[in-house]
Every structure is written in C-alpha cells, then in structure tokens.
Image (cartoon, grey):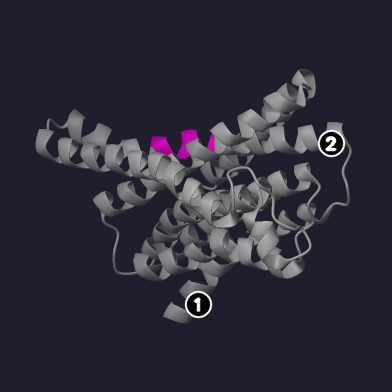
Amino acid sequence: MSGEKIALLGAIAGFTIYLGLPIGRLRTPRPRLKALLNATAIGILIFLLWDVLAHAWEPIDAALGKHRIASATGNGLVLAAGVGLGLVGLVYFDRWIARRAGAPGEEAEPGSSAGLWRSAPGRLALLIAAGIGLHNFAEGLAIGNSAGNGELNLAVLLVVGFGTHNATEGFGIVAPLAASGRRPSWGQLGLLGLIGGGPTVVGTLAGQSLLDATLSIGFLALAAGSILYVVIELLAVARATTLKTISTWGIFAGLFLGFVTDAIITLAGA
C-alpha cells in the first residue's frame, strides 16, 4: 500500500472527531442539559485516561514479567515524567494564558475569535483537544505500523475502531463550550478538530517506519497527564452546578460510551 493510501487511513480514523464537534453550536442550552453535557465529557475522558495509562503500562509490565529491570525502569521513568509534564505543565500553561488574557478568571469579549480562546471554556476546549491529539498520535502509530508491515486487514479494523471512538472524543472537546453557552464558529470547530484529529495522520505516517515502545509511552504519558488535568477542571464545573444526580448519570453515560467503542476495537481483533 502506498504512503498516500496509508495516510488516508489515518485521516479517516482521525477526522471522525468532527462528527461530535457540531454539538458545540447548541444555542443557550438549559442548565440541566449543560450539566449533562459536562458530565458526559468527564465520563468519556475518565475512560480515555484509563485506556491511555493501560496501554502505556503494558510494555513496562511485560518487561517486569521477563525480569528486564533496566528496560522497565527506563520506560517507567518516561511514563512518570510524561504524566508529570502533561499534568503540572498544563497548570502553568493555563496560568500563563490567563495572565495574557487579563486577570485570572476575567472573561474576554465573546464576540471576537480571540475572545473565545481567552475565555475559561475556550481554553479548556483547547486543552482537551491537545490531550486527545497526543492520544490519537499514538493510535496513528499503530495504524501506520500495521499497514507498513502489510497487515492491511488489521489496519482497516483499527481505523474502524479508532474512528468510532474518535467520534465520541469530538463531543468531549466541545462540551465545555456547550455547557457554558458559548457558540464557537465553524472555523473554530475546524481548528479544534485539527488539533485533536490531525495527529492521527501524523502518527500514521510516522508509524510506517517507526514503532518505538519508549516513544509511544512518552506520547501516551503526556496525553494521560493532560487528560487528568482537564478531568479535574471539569469536575470543578460539575460541582458548581449542584446538579449531582444528572452529573452522576452523565459520567456513567460517558464511561459507557467509552467502553462500548473500545469493545468495537477488541471485537475487531485489534
């Protein structure tokens, strides 16, 4: 299979993320719907956090089982450093963005394009997209490696599974915007989709000739740290709504969606 066709596989898997993004265009959703959207995004991201850490830990666990202590230690340090950088690094990055936008917590004018990204919901949407993008880069590595090794059936099945999963991730990206009542433009949704889904294509191209366990662990660890940071932020939003019952059901629904889409990948033999 040519490099162009392999890249097309990655594009199909990555850009299904756009299927969930139009939810961000909802007009002034009701408070209960806002709480449900926010909580469902939390559930999806909690599943992603578990999924990412599980995949990052697999090679470390395998090395420990074979008593390859040096390899396990090295990859374990990469995992710890990546999670720490993704989590703590975003704290300082978010503070830096907030300072540039004005006083912490200050909202910019919602009418301008820059105003959306300077708002707390806009920054959170960008952070979610970046974390999911790191995760999707690792998925792209798996697709590219399978296709590059001639395992086309497996590559196609991975595309189907990852593509289905990414559709739910698009919803997770825009949930903070929908919950806040801010309506991003179609161009802004396009940018969020590119940040979240584009790395799948890049990973697919790189995976044709490269699949290094340590590199994969590093990207997965960064994704895990950034996703954890976003989950903490969204949980604070959920608590502020005081709609505990709806939030609980939303988190459950998000977790359920995550496991269902992951089951599709497993049934496909990935």
Q: On the image, which quarter does residue 39 sit in? A: top right
Amino acid found under the numbered disc labelled 2: Leu
Segment colored magenta: 46-54
Q: Of 83 and 214, which appears nearest the observer?
A: 83
- For residue 108, side relative to residue 76 (left or right): right
Q: Quadrant of the N terminus?
A: bottom left
Q: On the image, which quarter does residue 85 sit in? A: top left
Residue at mark 2: 33
Q: With respect to residue 72, does 20 lie above or below?
A: below
As drawn, the residue found furthest toward the front would be: 103
Residue 255, visible in the rendered structure: no
Q: Residue at x 17, y 41 (%)?
A: 74
Residue 134, visible in the rendered structure: yes
| Mark 2: secondary structure | helix
Q: Nearer the viewer, mark 1 or mark 2?
A: 2
Instruction: Say whether residue 17 is magenta.
Output: no
Q: Residue at x 58, y 66 (%)?
A: 194
Q: Earlier in the sequence, mark 1 or mark 2?
A: 1
Residue 251 on image: x %, y %: 68, 28
Residue 91 on image: x %, y %: 45, 41
Q: Of 182 and 53, which appears nearest the observer?
A: 182
As drawn, the residue found furthest toward the top would be: 245
Q: Residue at x 47, y 51 (%)?
A: 96
Residue 136 on image: x %, y %: 49, 55
- For residue 250, side relative to residue 128 (left or right): right
- For residue 208, side relative to residue 127 (left or right): left
Residue 70 on image: x %, y %: 10, 38
Q: Residues within 10 Å of mark 2 (few under 14, many from 20)?
A: some
Instruction: Say whether residue 52 is magenta.
Output: yes
Amino acid found under the numbered disc labelled 1: Lys
